[in-house]
Amino acid sequence: MKNQNRQGVSRRSLVFLFTILTIGCATRSSAATITVPDRSDLQAVLNGAACGDTIKLEAGGSWEGPFTLPNKGCTSYITITTTGTVPAVPDFIGLCYQQGPTLLAEQARKATCKAAMKSQYASAKLPKLYTRSTGTAVGTALGADYWRFIGVEIYSANTSTDAPTYTIMRFGFDGPDGTDAKSAADIPDHIFLDRVYLHGNPLGSTRRAILANASNFTLINSFCDDIHEIAQDNQCLMAYNGPGPFRIENNFLEAAGENIMFGGAPPSISGMVPSDIVQTRNYMSKDPTWWADAARIGFAFGGKAWLVKNVTECKNCQRNAIHANVMEFSWQMNQNGPLVLMQSLNDGGGCPWCVVKDVSIYNNVIRHGGQAVQLGGKVAGQAKMGSNIQIYNNLMYDVSTTYAPGAATCFMISSGSSSGPTHEPFDRLLINHNTCDNSVDGGVFAVFNGVGDFFSNLTITNNFGRAPGTEGKPGEWYDAAIVFSGASGGRAGFDTYAPNSYSVSKNVIGTWAAQTVWPGSNDFVTPTQWDAIFVSRGTRNYNVAAGNRYKNAATDGTDVGVNWVIFNAAFGAGTGSTPAAPIAPNNVRIIR
């Protein structure tokens, strides 16, 4: 049981300093509502608040941090909100998402959405908590449980690119800028952020908005942007030393580095693996004007090439459901433009238990990058081999060498392993019912740095994808549709990398290739035939056209590629409809 004693100023002092709704001593049985005037002593209010209290910050007011959320041993929330009107719950997919007909049209919709949200936050006069230095605006004491923010703006006003704000909100540390929690008892529990506007300074460096080393962490209905740094990874949300569960739902997240990252730093608690994660209905993007080569896609470079990486990444996580999100933009910089990256990695040493397993990536839009999904096994002897990864029913398009020359791969797998006693097979990988319209100079499935027996239980079925080929020269480029380093493509590669343990069938590849070199029953089509598969590929309508031979031709009797009935029910088709509940993380399983 955590310490239940109340610390800080007395209730009578609070009555004297602030107008509050209750009068009494520091010990009481009923929750209070405390109104905090602009620029008054917020830390004293936080110190004196009791479990169940509501702290109302004056609308339009500002308070400069750092602020510490104390450990009060609560089992009910202390809520920090506004005296004004809390903004309505937005539907970021419905407001911001557009599928075609052009990239410029899609991004115009996103820009309009961003401007409208910022105008709404300004009109609401959200109370502001901020930092103007390298330090944190809001952080927790060790073991500070049950803190909730609703309708508050929290940001960095730091304009420096040389001395970045390291983190705006920091949970799971000994104070706002203290050291990591060293035991499970010190991890904050039940941290809840709803309709919070988090942002850096457009001109300055902010390394991350949230470090969420917590249990029962929730980020919903919130807006994060202007998170970027010149030479370091940066994120809207990162967690590496918190057990979860994590709920990340219905947010707009725009960061130059990883929009969401699990792992990426060594946990200070032995055996720690962030677990039971749900990422759903988030619009995750990057500003194309951050790219020095933005002119390639019709935009003007904004003048600062912030360090860009992938959209969502996990180096240490388990039971992670990534469902019904928009994930867009990644270009060649420190990486080869992957939009989604999952790889067991012991960053910084000291985490041999780090693992990526039981991950389900489904019903997402994944677009505008060099690679759609990149998976990694592990670095030999440094982490545990990844396992049980499902990638299904995703729409992937504009995966192109425009963003990363030599890339444009739908699914790229690198083992990071080696032969010998440290080798473990990558067990249970499912790639099913995805539509990937990548550029024709790319590939569908590529395995690099692998060794024999790299896979056990590999399933690739019912997918659309493209690979190089020259019309009129069948067979010239068959190896590029599925590439194995150190082995031939097609059946020979599968026999080497997944002997007696693979199923590859009902895939349709846009290339000229000899079907005889592939295992199973797969089709290979010319560019003209590829265009004819879809209702209107030119305007990004990827429904299979009526009467096309791939309609109802999948192994389960539905269309090859995305099952649009399931996709639209889950994704809401961008109309603001309520999505189906995501798969419970502990039910992630391979569907054969």
Image (tube, rainbow, N blue to C red):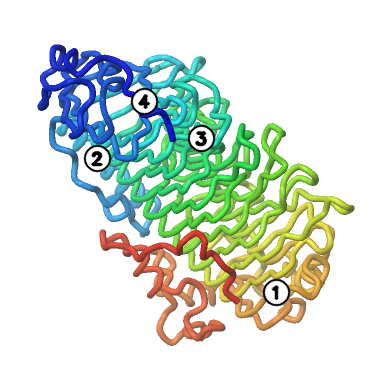
The residue sitting at 49% across, 59% down in the picture is: 585
Residue located beneath label 2 in the image = 117
Could you say which is closer to the camera, residue 365 or residue 246? 246
- Between disc 2 and disc 4, the foreground one is 4
Q: Earlier in the sequence, mark 2 or mark 1?
A: 2
**Residue type at mark 3?**
Ala
- In the image, 511 versus 141, the foreground residue is 141
With respect to residue 36, does 107 lie above or below? below
**Residue at left 44%, top 28%?**
170
Quarter of the image for residue 227 reads top left
Mark 3 or mark 2, earlier in chain: 2
Q: In the rendered view of the protein, which quadrant contains the N terminus?
A: top left
The location of residue 526, given as percent across then percent down, is: 60, 74
Disc ID at residue 340: none
Q: Which residue is mark 1?
A: 513
**Circle 4: residue type:** Leu
Mark 2 crowd level (few <14, some 14–19, many ≥20, 10 Å Cα): some
Q: Which amino acid, by three-letter code, is at mark 1?
A: Ala
Q: CA distance from mark 2 to mark 1?
A: 49 Å
Q: Nearer the viewer, mark 3 or mark 2?
A: 3
Tell me the residue at 44%/17% (across/down): 135
Q: Position of residue 174 (x, y in %)?
A: 49, 23
Marks 1 and 3: which is nearer the front? 3
Q: Secondary structure at mark 1?
A: loop
Which residue in the structure is indicated by mark 3?
Answer: 185
Q: Given this view, does label 3 or label 4 mark the residue nearer the observer? A: 3
Task: Say the numbered circle drawn on residue 69.
Answer: 4
